[in-house]
Image (tube, rainbow, N blue to C red):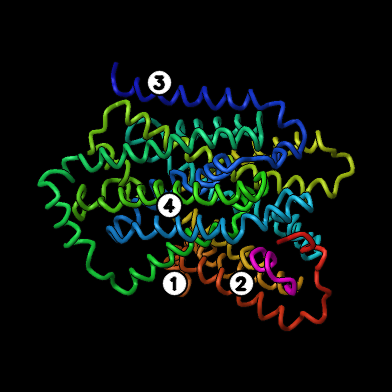
Amino acid sequence: MDTSAIIWITIGVYVIFMVVTGILNKQNASTLSSFTVGGRNAGAWISALSYGTAYFSAVMFVGYAGNTGWSFGLWAIAAGIGNAIFGTWLAWKVLARRTRDIATRLNLKTMPQFFSARYDSTRLKYFSAAVIYIFLLPYSASVYKGLTSVCSVLLNIDERICMVVIAVASAVILILGGYLAALKADFIQGIIMMVGIVLLIIFVMRAPAVSDGGLGRLWDYMQQHDMAPLPTDSAVSLIATVLMTSFGTWGLPQMIHKYYGIKDDREVKRGTSISTFFSLLVAGGGYFIGSLSHLFFADTLPAGGKDYIVPNMLVQARLPAVLLGVVLVLLIAASVSTLSSITLSASTTLSMDLIMPNSKKLNEHSGAVLTKVLCLLFVAASYIIANTDTPILDMMSYSWGILSGSFLAPYLLALYWKRVTRKAAWSAVVSGFIVAFIPAGSMLINLLPHQNTGIFGITEQWASMGPQFACAAMLLSLVVCVAVTWKTAKSEPQQTEFYNTVR
């Protein structure tokens, strides 16, 4: 049996598993509540692996690992360590229990509902719902693109076929089974990712480009390319990437949504340890693989650019056919998990927080149907955007920057600070949004026909600085939120009821 046949069989088994999982959980997605939070009884392992699989997709394995590995060498591993410590362990310690307590007591299902309950602002709920649905689309599209480069290199097939595979798999798991089906699928996919990344590291280390010459070759490579201090601009870029991909998760609705369904505080504590281990293994391993890129290609990028570094490394590593299938399933699983989380958060937010409050005809059952339709539309729109020429890294940074820049401050501070005011929340959202939108707006300007080389010669540079603007947006929104609160605290009553049972 040839290599392609073995790979396709492996992928086929995975797709069948996804369909069966969706069908078996179909009865758990008949109402809007069951479709979105699944009864709030998820255990530690399921919640932790669901968080991790939503965090890391083919965007990380292909886009970030290849890009940062090529630019920073072994220093790129700092991104994986930062994701594990700040994006996972610290995020769970700071956010998980209090978010779960508030969401359970007030029966909250989305981030806009959180804002509405805390700041008593329907307009803030509507605005945040619209922003979430619109600006999760670029992130979703980047998930598609992250997988297509691998499939096109390893299987030599049209990239659109790869996109259709993950679109169908994620749509089936959501439409049929909703939140619980996605959680159960994430658990299995998380196991696949952990096993796959270990095997991938082993075989990449055994590749001739790395192993020829023994450990001495790897040590020489580290000395020549990686151990020297980074230039200032490279160091700033790396730090911005670490901060955005770590603290950026603190304001992403699809990540916060994972805390809503946890069973109790005991599961929160266990989930913290499990998710941290998962992140350290998967993210650390992924960035480590990317950091070896110069051993494979010296100083010449492969055809297609940085998005094709990791796929071509896998070809040169001479992985066995079955392992290639496992690697593809790893990337498909990671991508489907992330895409499912993004789609569920975006669609439930739009239906529950923007459409249903303004319609008297929709109930729990019809609301669930509407949400499923919005899921299909979201998947289709993501597919369309993915067919543009925007790099993976840029699309993800635009989405993370705008969402976290807008929502991190009013969400994080509201968990612990009773004095935060509605005006402060609005000020933080607007200021963070404006700053984070600059690189995305610059990219749109550069796409306009018959333009000069960037307005004032800087829009092309700004378009590639998504992580830097994202960090600036998150920091600015925090400062603005605190400053405006101090200025307006006496003019607004404190939301003491919101904190009644929060420990």
Of tags 3 and 1, which is closer to the observer? 3
Residue 23 higher or lower than 72, as above or below: above
Tell me the magenta residue range: 411-420
Q: Residue furthest front?
A: 266
Of tags 4 and 1, which is closer to the observer? 4
Of tags 4 and 3, which is closer to the observer? 3
Measure the C-alpha gap from mark 4 to mark 1.
Answer: 18 Å
Q: Which mark is residue 477?
A: 2
Which residue is tagged 4?
391
Left or right: 322 as drawn, with respect to 416: left
Q: Earlier in the sequence, mark 2 or mark 4?
A: 4
Of tags 1 and 2, which is closer to the observer? 2
Q: Earlier in the sequence, mark 4 or mark 1?
A: 4
Residue 8 or residue 411, whichever sits in front = 411
The residue type indicated by label 4 comes to Pro
Measure the C-alpha gap from mark 4 to mark 3.
Answer: 30 Å
The residue type indicated by label 1 comes to Ile
The residue type indicated by label 3 comes to Ile
Q: Secondary structure at mark 1?
A: loop
Which residue is tagged 1?
458
Q: Earlier in the sequence, mark 3 or mark 1?
A: 3
Measure the C-alpha gap from mark 1 to mark 2.
Answer: 24 Å
- Residues at circles 4 and 3 in contact by the CB criterion of under 8 Å: no
Residue 305, image x and y in percent? 32, 50
Residue 339, image x and y in percent? 55, 41
Of tags 2 and 4, which is closer to the observer? 2
Residue 250, image x and y in percent? 57, 59
Left or right: 501 as drawn, with respect to 464: right
Which residue is tagged 3?
9
